[in-house]
Image (cartoon, rainbow, N blue to C red):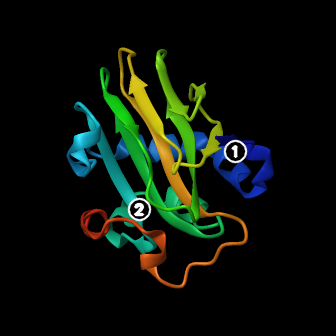
Amino acid sequence: MFFESSNFPFLSVLETNWLLIKQEFEQLKSEKLIDWPEKNIYNQGWKIFGLYSFGKKLQENCQLCPQTTRLTETIPGITTVGFSRLASGTKITPHVGCSDRVLRCHLGLIVPDRCALRVGSQTKSWQEGKCFIFDDTLEHEAWNLGKSDRIVLLIDFLKPGHKLTDLSQLNCPKPLIDVMSHM
């Protein structure tokens, strides 16, 4: 299930500044990116660079992307923020997220043809400079059948009306939280 980004006006700052965010990503050295830790759900080529992980600010990484950090810190209830790169030929198999307390936002930064995300029965392609929001506790899958990398800024934020007093409320597996919190 996708949500209209217009229902989340605080995301407009990302769309307005998407070229700045893209530029910060492009300045990162590719060895700074790490494999997504759940290797059982994709065939190859899914790398990430985290700024926030399950509520924890990754200081060193944030210093490398100060403008992106500043912009995303204006979003209420952020729990996770990072860049996600799918190499050409990458397929993420159908899976579900772990927390019903957050929504996931993708801001398209570099989007070749033949890339898409399916959530439930709906499929969407990313657009450069545009956000889309979805509930990742519904079955979803993604693919990049294009000829170059697909890059998005991924943000998890608390659903309106939800509060988080403890990370255990996210209901995510501890090994995933441990790996992501030490990127």
Q: Which residue is mark 2?
A: 51
Residue 157: x and y, percent?
58, 62
Q: Residue at x 64, y 64 (%)?
A: 75
On the question of residue 112 being in view, the answer is: no
Q: Are marks 2 and 1 in contact (CB under 8 Å)?
A: no
7 with respect to 91 (left or right):
right
Q: Residue at x 58, y 67 (%)?
A: 73
Q: Is residue 110 above or below residue 21?
A: above
On the question of residue 143 being in view, the answer is: yes
Q: Is residue 77 above or below residue 40?
A: below
How would you rate the neighbour count of disc 2 (Cα within 10 Å): few for under 14, some for 14-19, many for 20 or more?
Answer: many
Q: Is residue 113 above or below residue 179?
A: above
Which label number is shown at residue 160?
Answer: none
Give the quadrant of residue 65. Answer: bottom left
Residue 13: x and y, percent?
69, 52
In terms of depth relative to the viewer, which is nearer, 47 or 142? 142
Q: Quadrant of the N terminus?
A: top right
In terms of depth relative to the viewer, which is nearer, 51 or 155? 155
Q: Quadrant of the C terminus?
A: bottom left
In terms of depth relative to the viewer, which is nearer, 32 or 46? 46
Q: Which residue is mark 1?
A: 16
In terms of depth relative to the viewer, which is nearer, 162 or 50? 162
How would you rate the neighbour count of disc 1 (Cα within 10 Å): few for under 14, some for 14-19, many for 20 or more?
Answer: few
Q: Secondary structure at mark 2?
A: strand
Residue 82: x and y, percent?
43, 54
Q: Secondary structure at mark 1?
A: helix
34 with respect to 128 (left or right):
left
CA–CA distance between discs 2 and 1? 20 Å
Q: Amino acid at mark 1?
A: Thr
Residue 102: x and y, percent?
57, 61
Q: Residue at x 52, y 46 (%)?
A: 21
Q: Which marked residue is nearer to the observer: mark 2 or mark 1?
A: 2
